[in-house]
Amino acid sequence: MDKNEAIKKVKPQLTVKRFEHTLRVAETAVELAERFQVSQDKAELAAIFHDYAKFRPAEEMRRIILASPLPNDLLFYHQELWHAPVGAILVKEEHGIQDQLVLGAIHNHTTGKAHMNKLEMIVLLADYIEPGRSFPGLDEVRNMAKEDLTHACWLSIRNSIQFLMGKGSRIYPDTIHAYNDLTRHVNGGY
């Protein structure tokens, strides 16, 4: 599926603001993919579809989670997390995208996970640092993304965890696993 076809399928699923965000994420993902030698086509496709299910009704996403192999413990966390794994399922079912790397990048773009591949890190990071974002700590992550993909992802996950802890929110275990795994890499394997 080429870029224009993907955009045509995603646009009706999103608000204008979220669609503009999606285009910026795609552009950022392509830049990161070029920098870190990952397929630019896959990064662009995953980024275009990363928020595909963002505005699906909560009850629809709940039904999909319960009817799929997705872990049911997702339902115990904020529904903001649901759109990523549900989106990967819908993109496969509704648009025939079979590439497991692309689907994995869509699935994991909000929580991260241990042992992320480069494409997963790129989409997660592109979603975090796209030029329309503005919040404390972002410049440090953007600067690191010019040099070190793993370290930049670690910073983004660290910041997200600190943000959630500051709000007294629960943190999905995959995010903690991502943080621990990336910390090991950032600290030289320990």
Image (cartoon, rainbow, N blue to C red):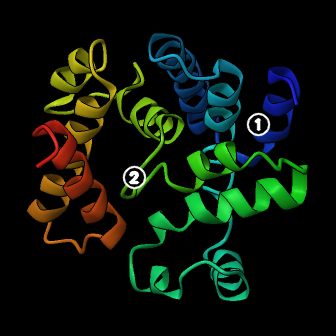
Quadrant position of residue 171: bottom left
Residue depicted at 82% across the width and 32% down the height: 6
Instruction: Please indicate whether residue 64 sits to the left or right of residue 98 in the image.
Output: left
Q: CA distance from mark 2 to mark 1?
A: 31 Å
Quadrant position of residue 76: bottom left
Residue in the foreground of this view, choosing between 142 and 146: 146
Q: Secondary structure at mark 1?
A: helix
Residue depicted at 56% across the width and 58% down the height: 84
Residue under pointer 1: 11
Residue 190 percent location from the top left of the image: 10, 49
Instruction: Please indicate whether residue 187 sits to the left or right of residue 110 in the image.
Output: left
Residue depicted at 41% across the width and 23% down the height: 132
Residue 69 percent location from the top left of the image: 66, 81
Q: Name the quarter where the N terminus is drawn.
A: top right
Amino acid type at mark 1? Lys
Amino acid type at mark 2? His
Instruction: Please indicate whether residue 21 sits to the left or right of residue 53 in the image.
Output: left
Residue in the foreground of this view, choosing between 16 and 145: 145
Residue under pointer 2: 115
Quadrant position of residue 107: bottom right
Task: Name above or below for residue 106 compared with residue 36.
Answer: below
